[in-house]
């Protein structure tokens, strides 16, 4: 890491809610490049806060909001980061994301540190698959780094850009240093999260079609084999040489997103979500295990036969949903109220 006095303070900005499963790994990795790691914890009920406090580089702040709002938490993180004097390099990562370990040797790292104020830095997203031996990447890079110039942040409540992206900002696209994403390395956990996302979409965007919601949150089932690549050894090696376990994925008997869905059921009734593809989960058992089973509440599948047929169609055609004939049927379903 450069020792020039003009080197920017490197700040990692990370929102957290119940990320104990991976937070220690994340902090150990981020501590190798960040001067400070600002964690905005949103009412975690697991050991996330205790893990964060053990890391000397962590600045732990509270996000007390009871609702999901990405823009709100991003502004909290930005406000905390801007307590540090300029120059500031902001790198925004979720807890299940780590920079590839080749940042330690790549000239791109120094190029990033020397980028002009106002530069937006783009990363490729490496979605690790089960076994961590292969991955796929979505098309396009993501604006997750910013040589902060104090610009206002204009994000959104869900799926927000994480940093300010001024219209005329210089752009730096990193080619060697990427972001490792662990979400798809634990399939059951990912499915729980995506069930919650679908229900959240229904509440936030009640007029949005169930077909559109399905296609968005099942994109991982349409990855072509030609878009799957082997993981490079140098993406992990530098971490493992420093004793950081990059391979273990802990099991989870109950994911917090399942609890959140149960609370949505209690508030709105399961029927509100009957067209979301969430009924592969055993909700009666989950409710009992979570001690959230309410007297008189039925957690059984509220779909009728037609609903089940549509979900079967969506599942069967997801690998080819971009085909014109599939899109025609999808449009017809939307006109029918789906």
Image (tube, rainbow, N blue to C red):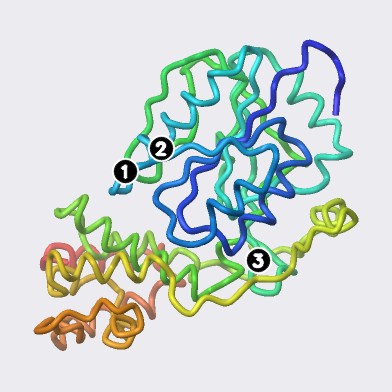
| Local SS, label 2 | helix
Which quarter of the figure has residue 198? bottom left
Q: 10 Å neighbourhood of mark 1: few (<14), some, or many (≥20)?
A: few
Residue carrying label 2:
73
Residue carrying label 3:
226
| Above or below, 213 relative to 188 | above
Q: Residue at x 18, y 74 (%)?
A: 274
Kindly check if marks 2 and 1 are in contact, taking CB atoms under 8 A apart as contact: yes
Picture coordinates of residue 55, whole percent (x, y): 68, 45
- Which label number is shown at residue 116? none
Picture coordinates of residue 11, whole percent (x, y): 64, 30
- The residues tagged by marks 2 and 1 sit, at their Cα atoms, a distance apart of 9 Å
- The residues tagged by marks 1 and 3 sit, at their Cα atoms, a distance apart of 42 Å
Which quarter of the figure has residue 35? top right
Q: Residue at x 28, y 68 (%)?
A: 261
| Above or below, 255 relative to 79 | below
The residue lying toward the viewer, choosing from 304 and 35, is 35
């Amino acid at each position: 890491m450069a020792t020039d006095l003009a080197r920017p303070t490197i700040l990692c900005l990370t929102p957290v809610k119940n990320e104990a499963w991976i937070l220690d790994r994340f902090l150990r990795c981020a501590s190798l490049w960040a001067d400070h790691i600002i964690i905005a914890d949103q009412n975690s009920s697991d050991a996330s806060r205790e893990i964060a406090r053990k890391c000397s580089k962590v600045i732990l702040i509270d996000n007390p909001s009871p609702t999901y709002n990405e823009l709100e938490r991003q502004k909290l993180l930005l406000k905390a980061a801007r307590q540090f004097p300029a120059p500031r390099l902001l790198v925004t990562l979720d807890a299940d994301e780590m920079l590839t370990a080749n940042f330690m040797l790549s000239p791109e790292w120094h190029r990033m540190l020397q980028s002009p104020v106002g530069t937006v830095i783009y990363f490729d997203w490496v979605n690790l698959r089960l076994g961590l031996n292969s991955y796929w990447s979505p098309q396009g890079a993501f604006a997750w780094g910013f040589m902060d110039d104090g610009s206002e942040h204009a994000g959104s409540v869900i799926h927000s850009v994480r940093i300010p992206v001024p219209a005329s900002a210089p752009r730096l696209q990193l080619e060697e240093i990427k972001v490792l994403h662990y979400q798809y390395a634990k399939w059951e956990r990912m499915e729980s999260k995506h069930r919650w996302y679908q229900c959240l979409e229904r509440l936030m965007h009640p007029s949005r079609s169930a077909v559109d919601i399905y296609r968005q949150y099942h994109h991982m089932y349409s990855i072509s084999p030609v878009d799957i690549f082997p993981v490079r050894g140098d993406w992990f090696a530098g971490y493992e040489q420093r004793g950081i376990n990059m391979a273990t994925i802990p099991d989870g008997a109950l994911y917090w997103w399942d609890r959140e869905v149960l609370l949505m059921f209690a508030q709105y009734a399961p029927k509100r979500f009957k067209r979301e593809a969430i009924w592969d989960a055993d909700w009666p058992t989950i409710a009992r295990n979570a001690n959230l089973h309410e007297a008189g509440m039925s957690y059984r599948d509220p779909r009728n036969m037609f609903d089940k047929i549509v979900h079967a169609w969506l599942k069967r055609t997801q690998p080819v949903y971009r085909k014109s004939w599939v899109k025609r049927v999808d449009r017809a379903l939307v006109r029918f109220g789906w």
